[in-house]
Amino acid sequence: MKIAVVGAGAMGSLFGAMLAEAGNEVWLYDVWVEHVKIINKDGLRIEREGQTRTLSIEATTDPEQIGQAELVIIFVKSTHTASAAETARKLAGSDGAVMTLQNGMGNADILSEFIDPERVLAGTTSHGATLLGPGSIRHAGIGTTTIGAWAETEQGRERARKLSDFFTKIGIETEAVDDVRSLLWNKLLINIGINAITALTTIKNGQILDLEITRELSRNAVEEAMKIAGQMNIKVREDAVDHVYAVAEATALNRSSMGQDVDNKRQTEIGTINGFIVRQAKRLGMQAPVNQTLTALIQTLEYHYQ
Ligand code: NAD
């Protein structure tokens, strides 16, 4: 299959590499010139459990070079989805599929403004990756990928099932679900309960559980978001708070992605996580003071980065 990855940072490079190693024609597209140059010159370096392998893979800063792809995978941060969608529209041509496995909410809606929603797939992945520097990533964790069709039509679902079978066959364990909105909301609730709190306080994920007052803050943020989901008729897991605590425990020594962004003075994905809840609450005439406060604090921190 001919596949283009838009946003070839940690996760884009990882998925691009796994797909290329399985024999697909893969192109990495990124706006980061130095990264692309190094990949083309020396190959992409992938570190996994202390071993490093180098993969020869096509990378470009010019989407015109790629031509049309059967599958376009979006892996920019959610703050850049609109510009990635514009590129994806060209790369996918008239019948390619476009898939997002990004965190945050709103990515698939943005993609659907540019591409026929019938061809948009969304999902989550438990693979984890870290960018070590230009041309170099670490495959930090392996897990399941779950996808579904954004347009809840039979044609869309069939596309999601076929793609998940294809991914699984080549070694990227993937499941297809019918209710992709619930899937994304359940992931969103985890990010809501962990990311901003850890980013603001410099703690690791597991430390959310150490103090009752921190657990309560996490619980309040999640329960507030669950109320919004209820108003929107989105089914989320009833034990979402316990699930957040379980994820915090299972990833106890990790610094959340938002934590890493703040540590490195990078723009975070707050607007599509807690900020998304605030916007939905406003739209529905509801209140979301906990998520509003977390959003305001992160945005203040970002504004004052040196
Ligand atoms: P990253 O910052 O490492 O990579 C993003 C890349 O996008 C960068 O290389 C950047 O140069 C590029 N980019 C920015 N604007 C672009 C544009 N308009 N066109 C093309 N490229 C552009 O981010 P990441 O850690 O790979 O995360 C990507 C997404 O995946 C995020 O939504 C993140 O939350 C999600 N995610 C990350 C992980 C993880 O372990 N890192 C796991 C699951 C989900």
Image (cartoon, helix red, strand yellow):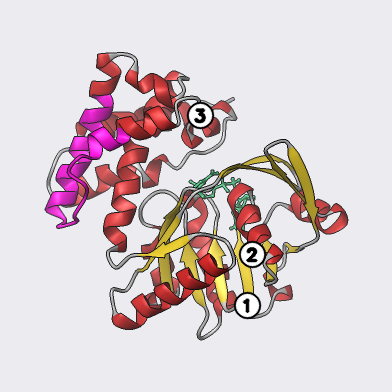
Q: Tell me the SS state at disc 2.
A: helix
Comes first in the chain, label 3 or label 1: 1
Residue visible at 26% across and 42% down in the picture: 278
Q: Are marks 2 and 3 in contact (CB under 8 Å)?
A: no
Marks 3 and 1, how far apart in space?
35 Å
Name the residue carrying label 1.
1
Q: Are marks 2 and 1 in contact (CB under 8 Å)?
A: yes
Task: Work out whether residue 196 or residue 281 is closer to the camera in this orientation and state it.
Answer: 196
Q: Is residue 295 visible?
A: no
Q: Is residue 12 left or right of residue 193?
A: right
Find residue 19 and name its label.
Answer: 2
Q: Which residue is mark 3?
A: 254
Of 168 and 284, which appears nearest the observer? 168
Q: Which residues are magenta?
A: 217-244
Q: How many marks overall?
A: 3
The residue closer to the viewer here, 286 or 208, is 208
Label 2 is placed on what type of residue? Leu
Residue 226 shown left or right of residue 299 in the figure: left
Q: Are marks 3 and 1 in contact (CB under 8 Å)?
A: no
CA distance for labels 2 and 3: 26 Å
Instruction: Please indicate whether residue 141 sits to the left or right of residue 184 in the image.
Output: right
